[in-house]
Amino acid sequence: MKNKFLLRLFFLYFFIQAVPLDPKYYQQLFADHWWTFSYGAIFDIAHYIPRFSSGPPSFGDWGIVLLIALVGATIWTFRLSRRSDQPPVFDNRDESLYYWIRTIVRYRLAIGILAYGFIKLFPLQAPYPSLSNLNTHYGDFTRWKLFSLSLGIVPSYESFLGLVEIIGGLLLFYRRSASVGALILAIFLGNVFMSNVAYGGGDIVYSLYLLTLALFVLSYDLVRLSNLLFWQRPASANRFRPALAAPWQRRGRVFLKVLVLFFFVILYGIRTRNGYLSEPYQFPLAKGLDGVQGIYNVSLFKKGKDTLAYSKTDSSRWQDIVFEKWTTLSIRSNRPVVLDSVNVERPVLGDDQRDYEVQGAADRSYYRYEADTVNRRLTLYNKNPYYKNEQLVLQYERPGPSRIILSGIDQDHDSVYAVLDRINKKYLIEEAAKTGRQKGLKL
């Protein structure tokens, strides 16, 4: 990059894109002591992207950044052109500027990719399907949810993908290996971006953001390699290093690198591993009612004074109910609902905010429940954000180990009565894991 105007344009553009300038970011950063940060909080810090509008991230924010960079580069170039000490060709000051923006971008890319790498290495991002997911028809999932569930059933492959991201991120921390890391990540992130586009993922903007950072870092050596291998032009190694004359500058550089490695590699890695063992973020942690986990056929259903026969088309009639081992209950019916398809990665650590189960899944209504075991009462709260005020209060009885009777008030403020009988069901994916795919299966 030998054009001074382009250098200043790219410097301002990537500086605004990579360096947090929003005061709210630093309020979040210093809201708590670093040693108490959960892996979810560190992920949020690493997931920074400049925003100039409300709602989800958009490419419109990029346009604003580019406009600011254009105006800034124009003013910068005009002011310096009036100074007599500015040579028309590149000098050490320009080389230093180019060096520092590459350093900023590769550290920003490393932090961003490591945030995803560790939640894949310890397979948290795409967990094994829940019981409700296993009892949802294939066609009732969105493309994104099918992709996530397909990744969740092969945790070793998910861990491998995380390892690739971590290796690429670590290579970026060292100048001599940065281009190798950028090449690995450019290929990887290109696939991630296309997967988001093809499967309707919610991180299209952010994945392309990381990809542009990788391509910018890679371009440093890519141009010189192209000159050497394809265009047969001279391509000497660039050995430029900024002059850090003062001792505090050299110590400060080492300190900042050690701080970043400690916070986003060592501390984040330990926190993520502990989270995988004790606090995974996709499903609730609170334990559900003892001995009720399973799928239940609704053998008898009354709404108001009417007894409704089993039907796959009746929007009021419950077809089956799943009790998870945690405090989630899902009801299958033909009730039309607005689908929750935000699909943005958010490692939230509160049970009432964990909505992975309901995201991208139709056919079922998902509820978080609170159990009053003394009065045998369940209070259900709809997990779908479009129905966050919906609440059901149901009394429960357990006349036998395989039967549950629910009665109370539904979301329409009408009385309901349902007799649930447990279905002893085997699942092909679990039986295959037990017996091996080469052997026969009996279901």
Image: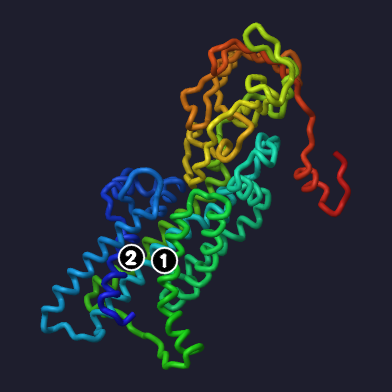
Q: Is residue 103 above or below residue 442?
A: below
Q: Quadrant of the C terminus?
A: top right
Q: Which mark is residue 442?
A: none
Q: Nearer the viewer, residue 182 or 271?
A: 182
Question: Dot 1 surroundings within 10 Å: few (below 14), some, or many (20 or more)?
Answer: many
Amino acid carrying label 2: it is Phe
Q: Is residue 375 visible?
A: no
Disc 1 marks which residue?
Answer: 213
Q: Earlier in the sequence, mark 2 or mark 1?
A: 2
Disc 2 marks which residue?
Answer: 14
Amino acid carrying label 1: it is Leu
Based on the displayed image, in which of its 4 quarters is residue 93 positioned?
bottom left
Q: Is residue 92 above or below residue 362?
A: below
For the point 34% across and 67% down, which residue is it?
Answer: 104
Q: Quadrant of the N terminus?
A: bottom left
Task: Tell me where residue 215 appears, x and y as whole percent.
Answer: 44, 70
- Residues at badges 2 and 1 in contact (C-beta under 8 Å)? yes
Left or right: 271 in relation to 406: left
Q: Is residue 327 above or below residue 112?
A: above
Task: Tell me where residue 40 appears, x and y as whole percent.
Answer: 45, 46
